[in-house]
Each structure stands twice: as structure tokens, then as C-alpha cells.
Amino acid sequence: MRLKSIELSGFKSFAKKTELEFASAITSIVGPNGSGKSNIAESFRFALGEQSMKSMRGRRGEDMIWNGSQNSPRAGRASVKLIFDNADRALALDFDEVVIERVVNRDGTNQYLLNSSEVRLRDVAELLAQANIGSSSHHIISQGEADRALSASPRERREMLEDALGLTSFLYKRQEAKRKLEKTAENSQKVESLRRELAPHLRFLAGQVKKIEDSQKLRDDLGQKYLEYLKRESVYLRIQKSLAKEERDAPEKEHALLNQTIAHLRSVLEKKREDSETNELMRLESEMHGAAGRRDALVRELGRIEGELAAEARMVPVPSKEASVPSGEVRTFVERVEQELDAALKGSESEIKNTLLGLVVFAQEFLRRIATRGEIAHKPAVSHEELLEKKTRLENELQEIQKKEGSLRAEVSVLRLQIEGEKDENRSAERELFVAMSRRSELEVALARLEARAQALVEDEARFKAECGEAAALMGRAVMEYENTVLYAQSGDMVTDADMVDEDRTVQGERRRKLERQKIRLEEAGLGSASEILKEHQETLERDQFLARELNDLAASAESLNGLIDELTGTLEARFVGGIEKINVAFNSFFQVMFGGGSASLALVAEKKKTRGAKSAALDTEDGGYFEVKGEGDKGGSEENGDEEDEDKEEGVEITVSLPHKRLKGLHALSGGERALTSIALIFAMSQVNPPPFLILDETDAALDEANSRRYGDMIETLARHSQLILITHNRETMSRAGVLYGVTMGSDGVSKLLSVKFEEALAVAK
Ligand code: ATP
């Protein structure tokens, strides 16, 4: 990496755009007092990000901007560009040329640009640190700062040395790591406090969730209970209903049949009463009586006729009222009686009775006829033939009538028997009717009972339907799946429909009561905003878990940051100690060259513990970067700061010198020139051990006498092998070593102008 040029626009006295090229290893800038040379040195500081306005002889950013003169108006902004050749990629940017630019505006705002892209100050600082251009500006020695290395506090000196040894980037890294660690600790605290704040709410929510889960369990259990209850109830009702129907079936049929039977029996009994058989019997009996009357009359008539005939033929008059009876007649009478009895004895009892009655009448007729025979003996007789004829006629008629009578009697007796039989039949019909009716009322009682049961079942069903509706409203449709529910007894066996029907109803009643009780408990638990609580709990829990993870992450990153810090500290220590040793050797050697003997050395000294804040502050810049700057005007001596914060093992660096031929030792014993020489020796030693890309020395050589100026010139040439040197000088010896000479002039307009000058021209401003 090589510094190609610097370009100033509106910076301090450089009102117009001015470019200095650094084509040579040593460039000298010469010019009269007040022409603006030091402004060039400061423009380097400015471009590299210097935050201390004081170190650039200003009070604020605006002081860096061309302030105008009579002829030239003031500028609105100051800009300084440093142009590097980056072919070797010493700056970690993939560009052959890197332009670092800083702009300050009148309002005090700053912009930092890398190859025209705006970046943070921090980016610039880190980029430069890689190329060993640290922030302590050990490579820019301003006017009057020649003995800076000596006047600095041990602590500042250490920083200067660290910077010179190229440890700045490690320091940055370490500081960054510490910053992150602090941030991590802060974040951890924040997260912890968030978790603490969250904890009671989370506990509360967890309690609520527990309640909700309990309720949910209760609810699930209620759902199960409902399923069982409804299943059992539905099965019970279904089977009971069909049983009731079946049970009604037979009695209903029987009842219907009985109704028919009863109606039939009744009609049978009704009909019997108005039956005509009795009438027929009466008619037959009266006809029979008629026939008997007629027969009697015929017998009487026949008897009279026979009497007349007998009288006619009487040979003997009848002495008394008694008449004689022809023997033939008696024989006929007896034969007839015998005949009829014979016939009657073959028949039924009533026939015998009737026959006997008929015979009685017949016997009476016979006696009457005999009695009347005596009376008619004296009456005039009808002709004998007429009598015989009449007798034959009457006998025929009698025979007819007797026949009729016999048949009528038989008919009557048959009818009587029939009527008698029918009377028996009626009695059995009445009996049957009685039995049927009593059976029917029995059945009606049973049917009424069955009806009541059916009615109860209907009511049960209505109640069951209402329960189903209630269950569905409370538990959702799932509970309506009860039909598909399979129940298991405690034994593990499946509960069958039959088991359910056989179960004691009080058990189901108890189930129902349990359901009701559980419903009340559930209502009391109040699941109203459950889903919201669950959601909130879940969210809060997730947040808490997230915070816990974040805490873990933070702890892990704190651990790795601590590791990094330790590692960086180790590296820094090792490099610093090694670097100091090398610088010591070079310092001693430069010192001896300068003073022609004697000795000088650096020694690490442990300073009292103190805060960095007392001497330096982490400055947060407006672009979010930070930059560590030394406390202005602080020249050490803050050891009295009683802050006990341990600043690691950071130690200061003391300088010990021993001048040749002098007894006095210690820096305080040096003259101004000796101090400048010692300081230069140290600066050169640092630059030699770890050469910076460029070194700007603003009249560092001002206090040197001729002999020392030569030695100084020699040393410059040595350094120029590794670093570009930009020397602001009035020293002719120094000018003589430069490859390029720039002259700075300032006209009456107060504007600095640049011109290339020859060594001879330069001598005009040399001392
Ligand atoms: P010497 O040789 O005496 O050290 P020099 O060449 O280093 O002098 P500088 O100190 O660089 O001179 O220049 C100072 C000049 O710059 C002064 O004239 C001062 O007025 C001018 N100057 C400083 N700041 C501004 C500014 N903001 N606007 C205009 N001019 C400025």
C-alpha cells in the first residue's frame, strides 16, 4: 500500500481544491510561517478520523472549513481525500485504489466515504488499523509535539506503543468484544427482568390453565358419562317399547276375540228367549188336546151306537139300571189296553205317562158307555143298518184320530226333550259368557296396566329427547354418537343390550343424578374465556421460553466473548511484550546515535488501578460507530482516581535514559533539545520496528543543531525505506533529503497555494 496523494477542498486555508502527490519516499513541505503547512498535516489527521478538534487547532468542526476572505467567500463544507494505491490489497478492499474521504459541514455533521460510498467512522478506523495506521496518530507528529512521546503519561505512551506495534486492530476487536459483552450483560439483565415481570402472570395463567384442564377433564368425563347414560337409556327405551308392544299383542288379540265371543254368546242367549219352540209345543199340546177331545166324543158316540145295537139284540132286559156288556166288547177293551201299554213301555217315561193318561180317559169312556146303555133301551130304535154304518164310520174316524193323537204325542215328547236340551245349552252359554266376561275384565286390567306402562315409556322418551337436546347443546354433536358407543363392564366384558335392560333402574337413576351434579360443577368452574386464557398462557409461555432461550444464547455469547477477550488479551500481551523488546533495542540504538552514547530503555510499569474513563472515553459517534479518543488535556496524573475497577493487566510504559558523560538520570534532567532528541529516537524506533505506511513530521527537527540535523537526516533516510515520509520543515538538512519539495504560500486573500519547488528555491525559506 502506498499513499498516492491527498486532496484538500475548503479545508482551513485551502479554499480551493489542492492536491499533493507523494511520488517520492520523502516529501518535504516548505513555506513561510503561517502559509498553511501545518494545515496540511492536520488535514491528514482530519481525513483519518481525528475526533479531537483541539489536536487540529479548532474548537468545533466548523473551524475546519475555509472561513472566507475579502475576495473569496467561505465554503459550506471541508473535504479531505486520501488516495491510496491498494494494488497489494494491504487495505482489505477489493480495489486497486482506495479513497478515504471525510467531509465536515457547517452544521458540524461529518461524512466518511470509502471510494465514494458513505460508511461509518468505525469502518474507516478498522480499515486503517489493518494497515497499521492507528488512531493514536503516532505517525503524525504535529508542530510542537516533538517531545510528545516523553511528555505523555506512561499510560498514553503504552497506547502509542500499542498503536505503533499494529495492535490497534486487536484492541479494536477486544474493545468491540468488551462492548458486546457489556451489551450482552445489559441484555441479560433486561431479559431477566422481563422474565421476572412475566413470572407472576405466567404463574397465574398456569393456575388458570390447570383449572381449565381440570374442567376439561370434568367435561370429557361428563361426555363419557353422557355417552354411557344416553346409550343405556336409548337401548332401554327401545327394548322396553318393543317389549311393551309384544306384551300387548297377545292380550289385545285375546281381548278382541273375547269381545267377539261375548257378543256371540249374548246374541245366542237373546235368540233363545224369543224362540218359537215353546209355542210349537203349546200348539202341539193343544192340538193333542183337541184330538183327545174329538176321540172322547167319538168313543162316546161309538159307545152309544154300540149300546143301541146291543139293546136291539138284547135278549135279556136289564133289571136295574145296570146294563149287560157284551163279552166281545170287554175283550176288545182289554186287548186295546194291552196293545197301548206294550207300545208305551217301549218308549220314554213321558210316553208311558201320556199313554197311561190316554188309557185312563179310554177306560172312563168305556164305563160311561156301559152306564148309558140301560137308559137307551126304551128309546125308539134307528134302523140297525144305519147304526152299523155309523158305527163303522165312527170307528174309522176314531182310529184316525187315535193315530193322529199318537203322532202328536210323539211330536210333543220329542219337542219337550229338545226344549229341555236347549235349556241345558243356555246354561252352558251363560257359563261361558260369565267366564269370557271375567276373563275380559281381567285382560282389561292387564291392558290398562300395559297402557299405563306405554304411557310412561312415551313420557320417558320425551324426557330422553329433551336430555339429548340438552346434552348436544352442552357437549356438542359428539355426544350424539352414543348409539355407536360400546360399553364395557368392569370385568372387561362388553355390556350387551340385554344387560342394559336387565339392569336395576335405580342404577341408571343414580347415573342421571351424577350427570346433573357434574354439570353443576362444570358450570361453577366456568369455562367462559378458556380459549383466550389458553391462548394467552401459550403465548406467555412461548414468550418466557423464548426469553429463556435468549438468556441461554446471551450466556453462550458472553462465554464466547470472554473467551475471545482472553484470547485477544493473550495475543496483545505477547505481541506487546515482544514488540517492546524490539523497540527497546532500536530505541537504545537511535538514542546512542543521537547522543553519541548513553542508553535509553522502556520499561513496563504497573499503574495503579484506574478506569479507562478517566483518561479516555468511548465516544459514540453520530453514525453509530465509536471511537476511542484520549481525554483532552489529560496528561496523566489521574492515578488518584479511586475507582477500583480493574483495568486488566494494562500497564504503563516508563522511559529511562542515561546521557553519556552525565550523572543525572531521568527525563526531568533533560534539556529541551535533549527531550526532542530522545522523543525522536523513540518515534523512529517505533517506526522502524513496525513501519507505518507514512510518517508525517511537522517541524520535529526544529530544535536540532546542525550535527543533530545530520543525524536526524540519516535516520530519516533509514526510515524512508519502509515508510513514506512527509516532512514539514524549515531545516535545510531535512529539505536536502527530500525527493519532492512542495512550497506553500499564502497571498493577501488568505488562501494557501501549493507549488512544486526546487531545492534551491526551498532554501529561501530554510533556516
Ligand atoms: P508556521 O510555519 O509558522 O508553522 P504554517 O505554515 O504551519 O506556519 P499554518 O499554521 O498551517 O501555517 O497556517 C495557519 C493559517 O491558516 C493561518 O493564517 C490561519 O488564518 C489559516 N487558517 C486556519 N484555519 C482557517 C480557516 N478555517 N479558514 C481560513 N483560514 C484558516
Image: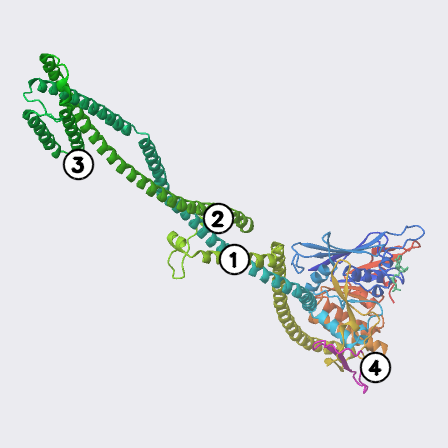
What span is in magenta?
641-666
Q: In the image, which is nearer the foreground, mark 4 or mark 3? A: 3
Mark sitting earlier along the chain (3/1): 3
> Tag 2: Cα neighbours inside 10 Å, few (<14), some, or many (≥20)?
some
Q: Amino acid at mark 1?
A: Arg
At 71% across and 78% down in the image, what residue appears? 584
Q: Amino acid at mark 3?
A: Glu
> Tag 3: Cα neighbours inside 10 Å, few (<14), some, or many (≥20)?
few
Q: What whole-number distance in Å separates the C-alpha atoms at marks 2 and 4?
A: 118 Å
Q: In the rendering, which numbered label is found on residue 431?
A: none
Q: Amino acid at mark 4?
A: His
The quadrant where residue 190 appears? bottom right
Q: What whole-number distance in Å separates the C-alpha atoms at marks 1 and 4?
A: 106 Å
Is residue 277 depicted above or below 527 in this figure? Answer: above
Quadrant assignment for ligand 1: bottom right
Kindly state the secondary structure of the residue where label 4 is placed: helix
Q: In the rendering, which numbered label is found on residue 668?
A: 4
Which residue reaches farthest bottom? 663
Q: What whole-number distance in Å separates the C-alpha atoms at marks 2 and 3?
A: 72 Å
Disc 1 target residue: 513
